Image: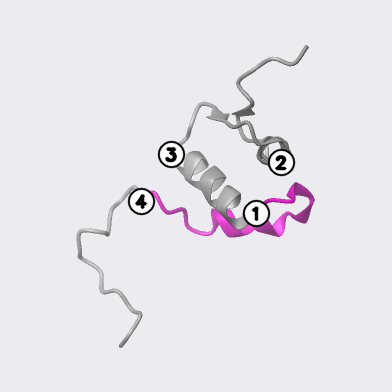
Amino acid sequence: MSSHRPSGHDHDHEHSTIPDDTALRYLGRFETRLRAGDALHLAIANNHRAAVIYSLDRTLVDAGKILNLPVSMGIRAK
C-alpha cells in the first residue's frame, strides 16, 4: 500500500485545519518546552488567526508568549 494521497479528494481544502510546517517550527524552538500536541494546537489556532488562545496550561501559555501568539489563561492572577 502506498501512503501517497492523490489530490482532488474531499480532504483537500484551500483553508486546511492542518498547518504546513508551523507545528514543527514551534517544536524546533526548544526554549518553549512544547509537547507535540500543544505545538499542533497552537499551530492550528495560528493558522485560523485566532484572536485569543485560552489555556490553563502554564507551559502552553508561556510557549505561546515566546512565539508571540495571542495566548491567555483567561483569568487574572492577584
Looking at the rendered image, the disc whose residue lies closer to the viewer, 1 or 3, is: 1
Q: Name which residue type carries label 1.
A: Arg
Q: How is the image coloured?
A: one colour
Report the Cα–Cα distance between label 2 and label 3: 21 Å
| Tag of residue 35 | 1
Residue indicated by mark 4: 16
User: For the magenta stretch, what is the residue range?
Assistant: 16-35
Looking at the rendered image, the disc whose residue lies closer to the viewer, 1 or 4, is: 1
Residue indicated by mark 3: 48
Q: Secondary structure at mark 1?
A: loop
Q: Name which residue type carries label 3.
A: His
Circles 2 and 4 in contact, beta carbons < 8 Å: no
Report the Cα–Cα distance between label 1 and label 4: 22 Å
**Residue at (46%, 53%) from the top-left corner?**
19
Work out whether mark 1 precedes mark 4 in sequence or the reverse, and give the earlier one: 4
Report the Cα–Cα distance between label 2 and label 4: 26 Å
Please count the marks in the image.
4
Residue 62 rendering spot, x and y as whole percentages: 73, 37
**Residue at (42%, 54%) from the top-left corner?**
18
Front-most of residues 56 and 28 = 56
Circles 2 and 1 in contact, beta carbons < 8 Å: yes
Work out whether mark 4 precedes mark 3 in sequence or the reverse, and give the earlier one: 4
Residue 5 rendering spot, x and y as whole percentages: 30, 74
Report the Cα–Cα distance between label 1 and label 3: 20 Å
Magenta highlight on residue 33: yes
Drawn side of residue 24 relative to residue 17, left or right: right
Work out whether mark 2 precedes mark 1 in sequence or the reverse, and give the earlier one: 1
Drawn side of residue 76 relative to residue 47, left or right: right
| Quarter of the rendering occupied by the C terminus | top right
**Residue at (35%, 51%) from the top-left corner?**
16
